[in-house]
Image: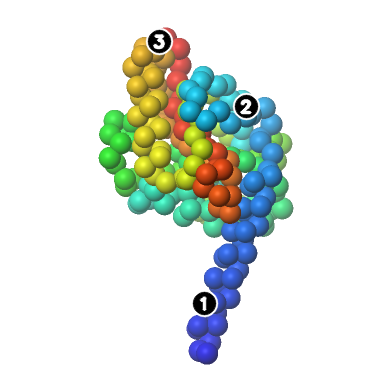
Amino acid sequence: MKPSQGLLIVGIIVGLGALFVWGYRAASAPLPEGFPPPTAKGEIEIKQYPAYRAATVQVRGDLGKAASRGFSPLFRHISDNDISMTAPVETRYPTATLQTGTISDGDAAVSFLYRSLDVVPKEVAQNVRVEDILPMTVVSIGLRGGYGYGVYTRGVQQLQDWLTAHPEYEVVGPPRRFFYDGPFIPDGLKRSDIQIPVERN
């Protein structure tokens, strides 16, 4: 076996090990302080979120792969800083995805959320930024099933239909998706919320 092949195999094993650890930790991870629970499957509701702190990376390109591409630098960040895993993982999508569900490329922000605003990392890599997110109100739809991008676009359309029927709410920010479960949870059991920040007129 060539040395390069050996290194490749080691890299794959390490990567799969990290994914397994993340999958286990995410499945049993607590929510950030003050966060409401996931929205029930198929329901649409208004939810209030407190301020929270997040480690975020920017990802450009295929929006369907944004969350998985943001995983490695964020996992290294919490591992290097000995920060406990929380759920959900957040992906914020371009506002343009509200206008047309067909957009599949763009800039997305992927975040691991800290347990509380008191968490301060010791070191932050150049491609990671730590940000404090202000309290917000969202309209949220609860989903069960795989984390594919088509599920996101269909969820956004359902929220858009709801907003059309509820004109007292105005969109005030980009849409996001909360992924509550790790990659080793069966697709049929995976939970996610798709949300749009809103304000009442």
Q: Considering the numbered disc 1 on the image, is that residue within a helix, a strand or a loop?
A: helix
Q: Real-space Cα distance between discs 3 and 2?
A: 23 Å
> Up-down: is 87 above or below 141?
below
Q: What residue type is labelled 2?
A: Pro
Residue lying at the far front of the rendered structure: 188
Residue found at x 49% / y 42%: 145
Q: Which amino acid does label 1 sit on?
A: Leu
Q: Real-space Cα distance between discs 3 and 1?
A: 55 Å
Residue 67 image offset from top left, x and y in percent: 48, 49
Residue 167 image offset from top left, x and y in percent: 36, 12
Pointer 3 or 2: first along the chain: 2
Pointer 3 or 1: first along the chain: 1
Residue 48 image offset from top left, x and y in percent: 57, 21
> Up-down: is 100 above or below 124?
above
Numbered tag placed on residue 168 in the rendering: 3
Q: Examine the image and state in which quarter residue 191 appears.
A: top right
Nearer to me, 127 or 49: 49
> Up-down: is 173 above or below 64?
above
Pointer 2 or 1: first along the chain: 1
Residue found at x 35% / y 51%: 62
Local packing at callout 1 (Cα closer than 10 Å; few below 14, some 14-19, many 20+) is few
Q: Which residue corresponds to mark 2?
A: 36
Numbered tag placed on residue 8 in the rendering: 1
Q: Real-space Cα distance between discs 2 and 1?
A: 42 Å
Residue 176 visible? The answer is yes
